[in-house]
Amino acid sequence: MTQTTAPRVRTLVLLLLAAACALLAGAGPASAHAALTGSDPRQGAVVDKAPAQVSLTFSESVSLDDDSLRVLDPKGKRVDSGSPKGTGGTTYSVKLHAGLPDGTYTVSYQVVSADSHPVSGAYTFSVGAPSETSVSVSGQETGDGIVGWLYGLGRYVSYAGFVVLAGGAAFVLACWPRGSGVRAVQRLVVSGWLALTAATLLLLLLRGSYTGSGRLGDVFDLSLLGQVLQTKSGAALVSRLLLLAAAALFIAVLFGAYDKREKEEKRDLTFGLAVGGTVVAAGLAATWAMSEHASVGLQAGLAMPVDVLHLLAVAAWLGGLTTLLVSLYRAPADTPVETSAVRRFSRVAFGSVVALVLTGTYQSWRQLGSWTAFTDTRYGQLLLVKIGLVAVLVGIAYLSRRWTAQLAQTAPAVPRQREKQQVAASAGGDAKAGNSQRAAQLARQRAAMDAARQKRLRDADPQRFGLRRSVLAEAGVAVVLLAVTTVLTQTEPGRTEEEAKAANPSSASSSAAPSGTLTLDMPFDTGGQNGEGVVRIDLDPARVGGNDLHVYVENRDGRPVDIPEVKVALTLDSKDIGPLPVVPDHITTGHWSASGVQIPMAGDWEVAVTVRTSDIDQVTVSKNAQIG
């Protein structure tokens, strides 16, 4: 039975790690956490004369350099002059050359939001009349490519390293002091320290390229590194490295002087190590809180300490869980994890879950702002996945408590003193033989036999074996949970996304789908009975020439309804074209259609829809959209 278990365990762990890496790899580039909420000229606008400057307004403050805001003419030549500057609040502007000719201009921006994430994008406006342009506004994302992937991986490894480092040390001090002498536990905690240190150095090197050019060759550019060190994110990473030096001293004491103390002496040292370790762990957690989501936006002064508490609770739960798993599988048979230690960790885990629920509820309210954001934003959808994983994890932990209650501490088959006598006698025989090669071979054989014996002893207790399996399942879910958490930190908060949509309703509702279809949603109210609803216009392919137009009418409950009359008119004010009337044919309940609708030229078109719900109740609603 035990011979087939190990391969299954390794296979399960590999599958879980692969799933987590796949989820991390599918995260894509970091979304803009400072959303563009306004611009002058606005997106798709046609102005009579060239403006003196272009201004952009974001949902939060951003960092800029000389190339952060660029304005390109129809041929792709830069027409901005000087460096971009803040004009008050969250608005930034760049001056333009005088006497710009008519045509379509592209505004490209690449900045860094206050929560450390790169923000990029582009839009167009026209002077006099729209024109053909050689500048593409697609593919303007930062944090993409190999540098973005490496940066995301570094973030995941840094979170995992912190969880193992802080949670493993807490498990030893709070639950299992004897574990300070177990080699497997020592290696685990040291590995967490090494992973966090290496990931922090990697993030520091990648930061300049990640928020700038995105080129791998710029990773070792010392000038970029100098610029990073002057930013909030750079200061947080450097602070993390300094705290990791203190953590190294803590580990040396925990697995050195602390391990060598007698039981009574350990009690005095435990309090000092617990205080010092808590301070270092809180400081490490603060390096994330001070530079990411918690540091900006609503109630930042309260959100940062709440975020620190949230990270510490995650580490105590998941890091302790990982240490328990390693102890159950790798601790020597003569140094088993006591039942009392497992029960103490059960209480620590329960307290951590309570803290996670409280702090997570506050963070969810702060980052989402509404119930609809759970389903209407990517951040909310990921948060639902995280909540589901936490529920699964708590469910498995509940089952583990059954095994904990049944767990009986098993004694090793061969007493330690007898084992030492056997080894000494064998070593004496080898010395008499004088054959060093033979002695080394026998030592290896004894080591292999001892490892096999200890494995048999660990697997002999059915309750302990059942606990190991349930803890392994918990750890597997925790790996995926940590990956989802990492993706969440790189995703635009739902509150910011909804604020951006509210500030730019036309750009949000007129976004073109991959097929090229333009969709416009317009609420209406004719004032009569059952006169409220939404009319949706689909124009495909939304280009110059023939187009298919579809009209969908829904009541306020979202159900398709028929009404007496629907008419559409298209107007291009900048060229005095229109209104061009379109009378669609009724297809089915709530659906009208017209084919061959001609768009004579590209521009900012007004789409007006007249909705009549009775003989006397009608209203006309309109919305502008860039077509062509």
Image (spheres, grey):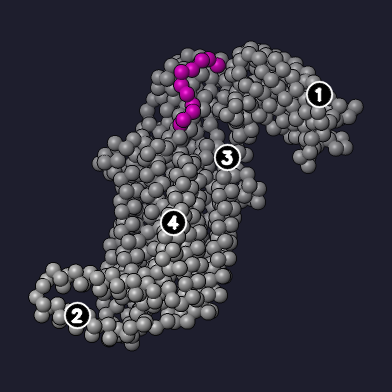
Circle 1 sits on which residue?
A: 586
SS at mark 3?
helix
> Residue 118 is drawn in which quadrant?
top left
What's the residue type where badge 2 is placed? Ser
Q: Residue at x 38, y 55 (%)?
A: 158
- The quarter of the rendered structure image containing the C terminus is top right
Q: N-terminal of the two: label 4 or label 3?
A: 4
Image coords of residue 116 (percent x, y): 42, 46
The residue where tag 2 is placed is 426
Say which of marks 4 and 2 sits in front.
2
Quadrant of the snapshot with the N terminus = bottom left
Q: Is residue 459 above or below residue 554?
A: below
- Under tag 2, what secondary structure? helix
In the rendered image, which quarter is residue 610 located in? Answer: top right
Left or right placement of residue 423 versus residue 98 in this view: left
Marks 3/1: CA–CA distance: 35 Å
Q: Which residues are magenta?
A: 130-140
Is residue 28 left or right of 559 when viewed as pictured?
left
Nearer to us in this view, 158 or 474: 474
Q: Secondary structure at mark 4?
A: helix
Q: CA distance from mark 2 to mark 1?
A: 97 Å
Q: Which residue position is annotated with label 4?
A: 11
133 part of magenta stretch? yes
Tell me residue 505's x, y (percent). 63, 34
Identify the residue under disc 3. Answer: 500
Q: Earlier in the sequence, mark 1 or mark 4?
A: 4
Depth check, mark 3 against mark 1: the one in front is 1
Q: Main secondary structure of the magenta part?
A: loop
